[in-house]
Amino acid sequence: MQKIVIFYNSRASRAGKSLWVDTIKKILFRSELNFIPIQSPEQIQEEVKKAIQNQVEVIISIGGDGTVNLLIQALVNTNIKYLVIPGGTANDLARELGLNRKLDKTIELIRKDQCKKIDLIRINGRAMATNGGIGIGAILTNEINSLRKKYPRFKHIMRLLKHKTYDLFLAINLLKPNLKFYNVKLSYNDQTKSLKTAMIVVLNQEKIAGKIKVIDGSSNDDGIFDVVVFGHSNNLNLSRCIAGLLMGNIPTNDKNFISFQTKSLKIESENGDKLPFWGDGEVFESSNVYQIDILPQVLNVYTMRKNHE
């Protein structure tokens, strides 16, 4: 009998939980199911260790990209297959895999055994599945996550605004007269570059927040990752560039919009300042140096898409 563990948000509503529990039980009735509420990162690590010992074949998570990020830390280089059921705001990994809120079709992927292995990106030892970076993205992610924790009703606003929540907070940060710019040194592909930037984005897929396309052709199974550096020196030029991206225009003629592909990148603060970093919708521990590397083909996921679709 196939063993499956389902991780879900312990604060999920009773009505929402009842819906997906019933659907999972209905479709996977031949499997041994174990539902576990998420309490802490440490608890997830322990539960995944138990799952490996108990020869669990599949892990399902119900939640957003933050839940994904917690789980992939423990799932790297295991034989466990991973199914993401989207339950957050951006749901970047779920979107990239072609998964949506149609529970029945998503869960049926387990019966079809429709999987592929994807790359992850490692940042100072911590894995990331989708995208992240330093600067504005980390600041607005921290602001949004803090409001979610402090004001429970803010989550309802996010459900209404969806990805526009991030657009709104991005606009607010761009309008700040004291927008933070960082002097950094980048080391990649046998070269170094020093520059001033308000944001660097590291990508394992083309889109951010489920809809903002910042680069063409980025894929999570090609053994490399993409980097976009916003080298604009003032709010106005940076705002123009980002406004273009929000309208679907990649600014290929903007000399301050720098992009490249690599397997390894080192970001160093040239004046020793801590650089805020976000990844998979979570804020990582700040550092003045980030070593970023590709982890090729280390996570086995269920997907609606195959072969770079």
Image (spheres, rainbow, N blue to C red):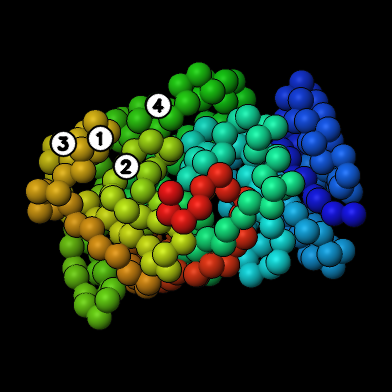
- Cα–Cα gap, marks 4 and 3: 18 Å
Report if the CB atoms under discs 2 and 3 are less than 8 Å apart.
Answer: no
Q: Nearer the viewer, mark 2 or mark 3?
A: 2
Q: Which residue is mark 2?
A: 213
Callout 3 amino acid: Arg
Looking at the image, can residue 155 be seen?
yes
Q: Secondary structure beneath disc 4?
A: helix
Which of the 4 image quarters holds residue 42?
A: bottom right
Q: Quadrant of the N terminus?
A: bottom right
Q: Position of residue 73 (x, y in %)?
A: 62, 61
- Residue at point 25% right, 63% down? 260
Q: Secondary structure beneath disc 1?
A: loop
- Cα–Cα gap, marks 4 and 1: 15 Å
User: Residue 240 has which mark?
Assistant: 3
Callout 4 amino acid: Lys
- Cα–Cα gap, marks 2 and 3: 15 Å
Callout 2 amino acid: Lys
Q: Position of residue 288 (x, y in %)?
A: 37, 66
- Other-residue count near label 4 (Cα within 10 Å), few / some / many at <14 / 14–19 / ≥20: some
- Residue at point 69% right, 48% down? 112
Looking at the image, can residue 70 be seen?
no
- Residue at point 13% right, 53% down? 256
Q: Between disc 4 and disc 3, whose residue precedes?
A: 4
- Cα–Cα gap, marks 1 and 2: 7 Å
Q: Between disc 2 and disc 3, whose residue precedes?
A: 2
| Residue projecting furthest to the front | 112
* Along the line of sight, the residue nearer the viewer: 143 or 86: 86
Q: Which residue is mark 4?
A: 164
Q: Position of residue 309 (x, y in %)?
A: 43, 49
Report if the CB atoms under discs 1 and 2 are less than 8 Å apart.
Answer: yes
Q: Between disc 1 and disc 2, whose residue precedes?
A: 2
